[in-house]
Amino acid sequence: MLAGSDKFIEHFHRLVAPLRQHRLAWLETVAITLGAVAAGIFFQHDNPFQVRGEFPWVWLAPVLVALRYGVAPGFISSLLLIAIWKWMDYSAESHAAFPEQFFLGGLILVLVCGEFSAAWSARLRRAEETNRYLDARLSRITSRHLLLRLSHDRMEQEMLLKPATLRQALGNLRQLALQRDDTSMPASDVLLQLLAQYCQLVSAAIYVPIERGYVCVSRVGEPPALRETDPLLRHALEHQSLSHLQVEDVTNETLASPFVVVAPILSSSRRLQGILAIERMPFLALNEENLHMLSVMLGYYADCVDEAEGVRQFKAMLPEAPPDFAAEFPRLLRLQRDFGIDSYIVALPFSNDERGRQVVAGLTQVRRGLDIAWQVIVGERIWNVNLMPLTSAAAVEGYLLRIENMLREYGAVVHEEWTLTPIRIGLDQADPLATLHQLLEPSHA
């Protein structure tokens, strides 16, 4: 009951105050304004605008429009009220004096409401994009932790038969996915072979959606074609998750599926890249742990493909950067340029000796959970480059203060021996990647 009430309230909020302006905004502006005037004529025919009434109810229409869609629609609604007044005044037998204060005060009120709406809409969009980034980041981190655990669990038994571990295989898959390819799913053959090896697939295929239906791009065995009416496929696309024959919604279907498992290949941003359909696999392999591993590996591959273009551009200038650093940088740059959500890169140089390496290793204790660190040796220095997502200038100063406190407490080393010369690179710069590249050049170091 409470869940239904919450959904009703959420739907009502979206109806009254939508987050984004849609195509019908101008039509609604005209309809709401005309509706308010019509209501005024119905309730008070002699004075529909309530010019000398106790309260000018007709101005609620432009105010509502301004709160919903901003300054411009609210201003148009106000002008429409003035035009209707003029038309009604000319059609009357005697012309009335134009109420300047009435319309001027209402117009100022509408403009104030429109500015209020624009400011809060911008804040809501920024908060929405921030939450979307954090959700996607959490999804990627969770998937990689699960892959790491599964890799460690299987390492001992797989090492005797297969010299390559799951982590090494995924690393090779990531490198292949980053290569330029004319297809929408690069290295799909390698992905399917990896899945067949670690998830015991006997007959399976990877399909990509086209205008009408699906086309197979990689296969193992002789799986049948994937139909749009397949119940497993419909269930997987509807729920955006792996679907198998034991799913309750599928067991009641009259149309049988030739597959035992259908899994969408979705990235953390929920972009569909393809479909994995499994026709045959060993009965003992059809268990929850194996299917969970299958879903995580598909999501890992989808993220690699999704971030490939940005990583290639980053690696072209800084080829030694770790994959996580190169992948997060273009995402944060998009948030900065599209929504003004600040992020920073803080680079700290230390001497490339034993003491300097110990200090750099200790910096992991003061960085935040979202931060991504990169240690790179340039000449006689070792740079600790820290990517700080969703960070303000004040948070950067707090990070540097924690580093100073750590250096002060660092063993028997005198703090004066360490001189912090941090380099702050805000992603709001014209080209932060070029600035970082120039900083890490051997000639600059």
Image (spheres, rainbow, N blue to C red):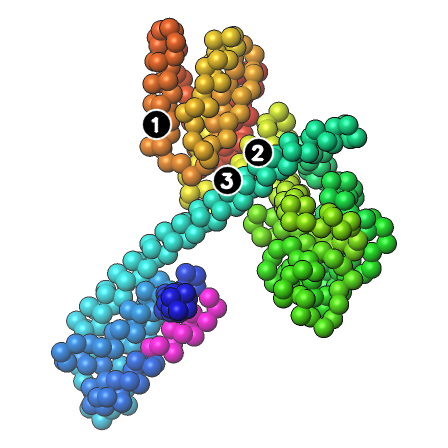
Query: Which residue is found at the position 46% from the left and 66% from the top?
Result: 22
Let me know if residue 380 is in the magenta part.
no
Q: Furthest-bottom residue in view?
A: 93
Quarter holding the N terminus is bottom left
87 vs 351, nearest the viewer? 351
Q: Could you tell whether 299 is left or right of 428 in the image?
A: right
Q: CA distance from mark 3 to mark 2?
A: 14 Å
Query: Which residue is found at the position 70% from the left and 28% from the top?
Result: 156
Q: Of marks 3 and 2, which one's residue comes earlier in the chain?
A: 2
Query: Which residue is found at the position 38% from the left and 76% from the top?
Result: 30
**Which stretch did the figure color magenta?**
22-33
68 vs 48, nearest the viewer? 68
Q: Of marks 1 and 2, which one's residue comes earlier in the chain?
A: 2
- In the image, residue 207 sits, relative to residue 353, either above or below, namely below
| Dot in front, 1 or 2 | 2
- The residue where tag 3 is placed is 333
- Residue 103 percent across, percent down from the top left: 22, 72
| Dot in front, 3 or 2 | 2
Type of the residue with mark 1: Glu
- Residue 427 percent across, percent down from the top left: 46, 36
